[in-house]
Image (tube, grey):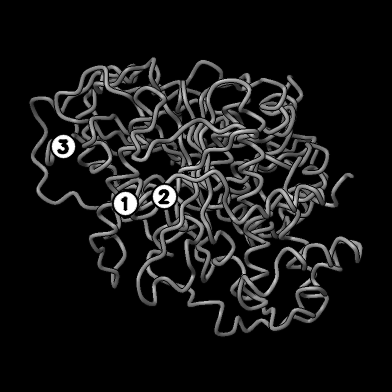
Amino acid sequence: MKPPFRSLRSNVALLLTACALVACDEDPGADAGPADAGLLDASSGDGGGSDAGDDAGVTPPGGGTRATTTSGDVLGSESDGVITFRSIPYAAPPVGDLRFARPVPHPGWTEALDTTTTDPTIACPQLERTGGAMRGQEDCLVLNVYSPSGARDRPVMVFVHGGGFTGGSANEPLYQGHRLASRDVVLVTINYRLGVLGFLAAPGLVEPDGGAGNLGLWDQRLALQWIRDNAAAFGGDPDNVTIFGESAGAVSVMSHMVSAQSAGLFERVIIESGGGGLSTPTQAEVFTRYQPILESLGCASAADLRACLRALDYEAILATTNDAGMSALGLPAIGPHLDGVFLAEDPIDTVARGGGDVPFLIGSNADEATVFTQGVAVPTRAAFRALLLSLYPAATADAVLGIYDASLGTPKQQFNAFFGESGFVCPTLAMAAAGSGGEPARVYHFTRVLPGVAGLLGSFHGLELPYVFGTTDVTPGYTPDAADAALVETMQRAWVGFATDGVPVFDPGWAPYAAADPAIAILDEPPAAATEIVAGRCAQLAALGIGVP
């Protein structure tokens, strides 16, 4: 049967709409948890501060802190055996005639660029999630490099940040890269255009090849080209690059994995909480979705759309961010689409056909939904059923209720489990199964729950990030404990092992995933291995046509 929706993008949007239709109380109630439990703000990737991070004790440039790139020489700073090069431009500023155009390489510089004096807080234009304040600048296409001192031919890891394609930055404190780079890898974190400036598509913006928009993905691709061309200058191996991302960043790296435009720029992919590459909108669909933006800007009937948009202040463009409506996650409905050039079909469909055949590691967190559903009250089973009936026939709704029963806790907890599993966990397994016939696919399930009040949201969306980067101490008010330190060790060894040779270093072992022989790494303290997660509910949902392509 063709399901009424396949993934989080449509699933959650409909659920939240349904909540409004059945007059759900906006008070989250006791079981929803606080808005800022523990590491939530730091790990969401959806905004927040853009402080430089912990650079205390750096030494002046000199010695091994100079690198010669295709753009020019850059100077960095060394601290605790890791050299940092901050905010290196990889593209020409996307302003003037380059606004709403695919990126072009930076023209370069003749004098050495001292990255100890470049702005370490650069972010692309965005609206803060709370309050709606604007931050960022158009000249934002920069990247950061963290290189172990004396590195030579080391694996390269390139991180793409999340934030719903409308927020976030490579310069968030959460992504400070010293600790991960100290594992003897060259780490690169990149900025890319966001929101309307990064993803607006319209008939008047169509390129000669037929594609429009997706500029944020083209930015990422140019950054990957720059990294390939310059990895050796920082001690990296250009033939051993792994791209990884979380949330919107995970959707991004899935897009590169299957795009012919990015072929040959990396060897492996890590996909953190990105779902399963389902239900990407078509170009025709986003032309309609983005029309209100053009109308708000007074450019809807312009004879030369690019000229009209380029004549505006970028602040005016940024102010229309919400005009396209809201996505499944309660964020502006802006992001990648199927343009026939960068993306021709949903990533999972490409992978199932044998395309994008590179080793990949993919996973989700046990409580993905909790940060998104705090404002949705589900006080009773009847309220849960009412939500489901707005989406499914009664038989399907009742079948879902039979799967998500009282054994999972309160009705709100049952709803959260369904939301997270149908939108993240089960599509993740479907993606791994789709790719299991080619290069190895490996699956993880992150289950760490923070102690005390910080744990009220469970293993929430993005919580794995401070363990990957070793930044569990970035949030005031939370003190990492011995279990946190042990899990940082476990996850960094696994991620770096995968980036080194495609095999995660993980005890008790991490075998490739196959639908007929599933193997799943359980990331917690202590770590474990499993052949089944969420009590087999993904198979039950799949039988109903939910959470699968």
C-alpha span from label 3 to label 2? 34 Å
Badge 3 is on which residue? 77
The reply, left or right, for residue 302 in relation to residue 320 is right
Q: Are marks 3 and 2 in contact (CB under 8 Å)?
A: no
- Residue 202 coordinates in the image, percent (x, y): 76, 39
Neighbourhood count class around disc 1 (C-alpha, 10 Å): few under 14, some 14–19, many 20 upward: many
Badge 2 is on which residue? 523
C-alpha span from label 1 to label 3? 29 Å
Q: Amino acid at mark 1?
A: Leu
Q: Amino acid at mark 2?
A: Leu
Asked if residue 351 is positioned above or below residue 312 in the image, the reply reads above
Q: Residue at x 33, y 19 (%)?
A: 230
Of residues 192 and 243, which is closer to you in this image? 243
The reply, left or right, for residue 148 in relation to residue 497 is left
Q: Residue at x 52, y 27 (%)?
A: 221
The reply, left or right, for residue 288 in relation to residue 406 is right
Q: Mark 3 or mark 2: which comes first in sequence?
A: 3
Of residues 55 and 21, which is closer to you in this image? 21
Q: Residue at x 63, y 72 (%)?
A: 407
Q: Are marks 2 and 1 in contact (CB under 8 Å)?
A: yes
